[in-house]
Image: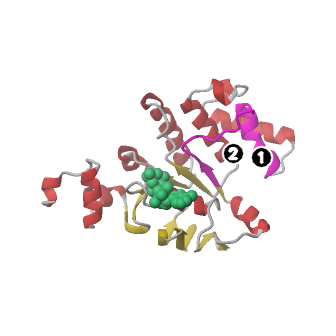
Amino acid sequence: MSYVEIRNLKKKFGNNTVLDGVDLDIEKGEVVAIIGPSGTGKSTLLRCLNLLEKPESGTIRFDGESYDLTTRNAREIFALRQHTEMVFQQFNLFRQKTALENVMEGLRVVKKMSRGEARTAALAALENVGMQDRIYHYPRHLSGGQQQRVAIARALAMKPQLLLMDEPTSALDPELVQEVNVTIRKAADEGNTILLVTHEMPFVKSVANKVIFLEKGKVVACGTPREIFEHPASDRLRQFLIHINMLEAAEYNI
Ligand SMILES: Nc1ncnc2c1ncn2[C@@H]1O[C@H](COP(=O)(O)OP(=O)(O)OP(=O)(O)O)[C@@H](O)[C@H]1O
Ligand SMILES: [Mg+2]
């Protein structure tokens, strides 16, 4: 039994089948990267896991506790949301709150911590991402990279069993990508379990334990970065890697 088990996740928008029965196992402390062409359902997959979308079917199991991802029962939604946190491409910080207040919010409202406890935990989380000097700054006075580090601190402070990240660096200027990647790597090194969608293949190669190639709503290939990038077993995966310049076409006569 894996630490997180996702089974038979299906999602349609009208007649458009976006996720076509996705199964996924994630081990504790693993970084699992989801790669694949644009429009293939990567964001939708994460959004279904965080109940931001309602799928047609699907379950997720954490440590033996199973949840129906189609549920609209408020208590079940609350219980399931305790297990995951999401980091978005656009940071999604509360604009009217300081960095510190952003991190404290979930600790107060969801974890029901006292103000003092929440402040202590939030300060530790912000220090962990190197933002201790910016705790009273509002998002508009922070760079994109700093905002994303606050968003990561906010997510990690909640101690989720699974951290979901949807292209956390793709909205950043190139020179800011590295500082966020360093923060993600640190979170991985500290044993957090992460499901990451990204188009940054060198980062995937260096940080992921497992890579999932998603295409047209199906898991077409799954393996270690070595298996996926150096010995791709499926034609579709090889074509994708050639398309993004991660593989020499000549090698495969494609
Ligand atoms: N709210 C929505 N309503 C209708 N269709 C949607 C909605 N959200 C996504 N889609 C469609 O679902 C499909 C998958 O979209 P999704 O955003 O999950 O792709 P993606 O793999 O994350 O792509 P990208 O790499 O460009 O971020 C696309 O065809 C998209 O148009
Ligand atoms: Mg997306």
The answer to if 104 sits in the magenta stretch is: yes
The residues colored magenta run: 85-110
Find out if the beta carbon at label 2 lies less than 8 Å from the nearest ligand 2 atom: no
Q: Measuring from the top left, give residue 39's x and y in whole percent.
A: 43, 57
- Residue type, mark 2 in image: Ala
- Looking at the image, residue 17 lies above or below residue 106: below
Quadrant location of the N terminus? bottom right
Q: Is residue 66 shown left or right of residue 120? A: left
Q: Measuring from the top left, give residue 8's x and y in whole percent.
A: 52, 75
Residue under label 1, please give it: 107
Image point 48% across, 40% down: which residue?
Answer: 169
Closer-to-camera residue (250/233): 250
The answer to if 203 sits in the magenta stretch is: no
- Residue type, mark 1 in image: Leu
Query: Which mark, by number, is residue 157?
Result: 2
In terms of secondary structure, where does tag 2 sit? helix
Number of numbered callouts drawn: 2
Quadrant location of the C terminus? bottom left
Circle nearer the N terminus (1, 2):
1
Closer-to-camera residue (253/159): 253
The quarter of the picture where residue 160 lies is bottom right
Image point 38% across, 57% down: which residue?
Answer: 36
Q: Is residue 242 shown left or right of residue 193? A: left
Image point 52% across, 64% down: which residue?
Answer: 26
How does the figure colour the protein chain or chains?
Answer: secondary structure
Query: Which mark, by number, is residue 53?
Result: none
Labelled pair 1, 2 in contact (Cβ < 8 Å): yes
In terms of secondary structure, where does tag 1 sit? helix
- Looking at the image, residue 132 lies above or below residue 154: above
Q: How many angstroms separate mark 1 from mark 2 (CA)?
A: 8 Å
